Amino acid sequence: SASDKPEVQAIIERVQTLHQTLHKYNYQYYVLDDPTVPDSEYDALFHELKAIEVKHPELITPDSPTQRVGDKPLTAFQTVDHEMPMLSLDNVFNEEEMRAFDVRVKKVLDQPESADIEYACEPKLDGIAASLLYENGLLVRGATRGDGNRGEDITMNLRTVASIPLRLSGTGYPERLEVRGEVYMPKKGFEKLNQSALESGEKLFVNPRNAAAGSLRQLDPKLTAKRPLEFCCYSVGIVEGGSIPNSHFDVLNQLKEWGFLTNPEMARVDNVEQCIAYYQSLLNKRDTLPYEIDGIVFKVNDFDLQDQLGFVSRAPRWAIAHKFPAQEKITVLRDVEFQV
Ligand code: NAD
């Protein structure tokens, strides 16, 4: 009706503003490695946009930040087309939303609400996603996620990360195997790096994630080699000429046998209530962990169930990140200069 019009117009204008603002923040965060607002502020705007789109699906456009993963890569590196897209994760922020996620899973799987779904639980390391391609056991390429379809070829830099096997150990690995995981900078290394930057009058890094991202995108691999980076694997992509176990947890244990670092906190639980208990216990341990985590990732453990659940635009339907409460220091550090 005519009386709706100004209201609808206001919503359309808000959506446009949110698109512009989120695109700008994405570019600063993913391309420049130089965020200007804390993640919690970004997340709040992202969720506002999502909520509007749920109410008004006709306002969803293909270029909406809710439909995209990351941002386009820089041009300094060669680009890599991901044969299997590297997706993002949907988030929940409390127990109620976590239980609602579990209910949605069972609905899609056509299981009763009382059924128990087995989940794999892993800390959500706050670094950047990397894809490692192995052919006949040899590391042949390493790439960033980029916008999910195209990333940057950073093979030379990834080769300098000590916990990335240049050759797989053991036997039985597929001829072509893509291992995915997070490159991150442990807290101690980050503090040391910033301490020496401070002493030599250089710009400081905002946080370990930012430091890891900047370190990986050095054009000179010798600089990357000096940075205290680690790689922890959390999934596989391409599997050809061989096979892997049929659950997430078993695959991670297999990757460990082939030489990868897996997270010692990872666990397998029987149902969503145990996911919530796991979340609480890790939240309590958060400050004692040697690396920064910004939440917990829960994944439906069984690959057959994962296949049935499939994907939506930018994230798998079988995984969710339960984010920890914000713990930002960006404002405190505003008066010192930061480097990318
Ligand atoms: P995300 O970081 O929320 O989740 C997806 C990523 O989680 C994966 O790509 C992977 O790198 C990582 N991850 C860590 N542990 C994992 C595990 N065990 N299994 C699977 N994945 C794991 O999503 P995103 O799309 O990379 O980025 C969104 C995040 O970036 C939000 O938290 C947002 O606050 C932040 N962001 C901030 C700004 C800003 O301006 N401050 C801008 C854009 C994005």
Image (tube, grey):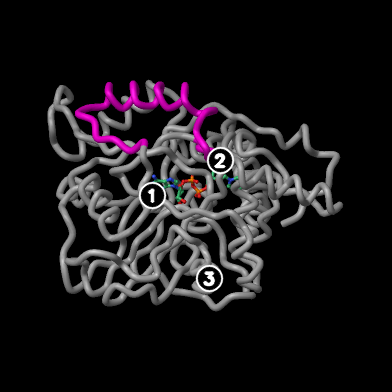
Q: CA distance from mark 2 to mark 1?
A: 15 Å
Camera-side residue of 255 and 105: 255
| Among the two numbered marks 2 and 1 on one chain, the one whose residue lies closer to the N terminus | 2
Task: Report the amino acid beneath label 1.
Answer: Ala
Whether residue 24 appears in magenta in the rendering, the answer is no
| The quarter of the displayed image where residue 5 is located | top right
Task: Report whether 115 appears left or right of 21.
Answer: left
Residue drawn at (52%, 37%) of the image: 290
Q: Magenta segment, which residues?
A: 265-294
Which of label 3 and label 2 is nearer to you? 3
Q: CA distance from mark 1 to mark 3?
A: 24 Å
Tally the numbered discs. 3
Task: Report the amino acid beneath label 2.
Answer: Phe
Residue drawn at (55%, 78%) of the image: 78
Camera-side residue of 299 and 164: 164
Q: Are marks 1 and 3 in contact (CB under 8 Å)?
A: no
| Among the two numbered marks 3 and 2 on one chain, the one whose residue lies closer to the N terminus | 2
Q: CA distance from mark 3 to mark 2?
A: 29 Å
Helix, strand or loop status at disc 2: helix
Helix, strand or loop status at disc 3: loop
Give coordinates of residue 283: x percent, y percent.
46, 25
| Among the two numbered marks 1 and 3 on one chain, the one whose residue lies closer to the N terminus | 3
Residue under label 3: 154
Helix, strand or loop status at disc 1: loop
Whether residue 277 appears in magenta in the rendering, the answer is yes
Determine which of the numbered discs, if any, sits on residue 46 in the image: 2
Determine which of the numbered discs, if any, sits on residue 315 in the image: 1
Task: Report the amino acid beneath label 3.
Answer: Ile
Give coordinates of residue 275: x percent, y percent.
31, 27
Give coordinates of residue 63: x percent, y percent.
53, 58
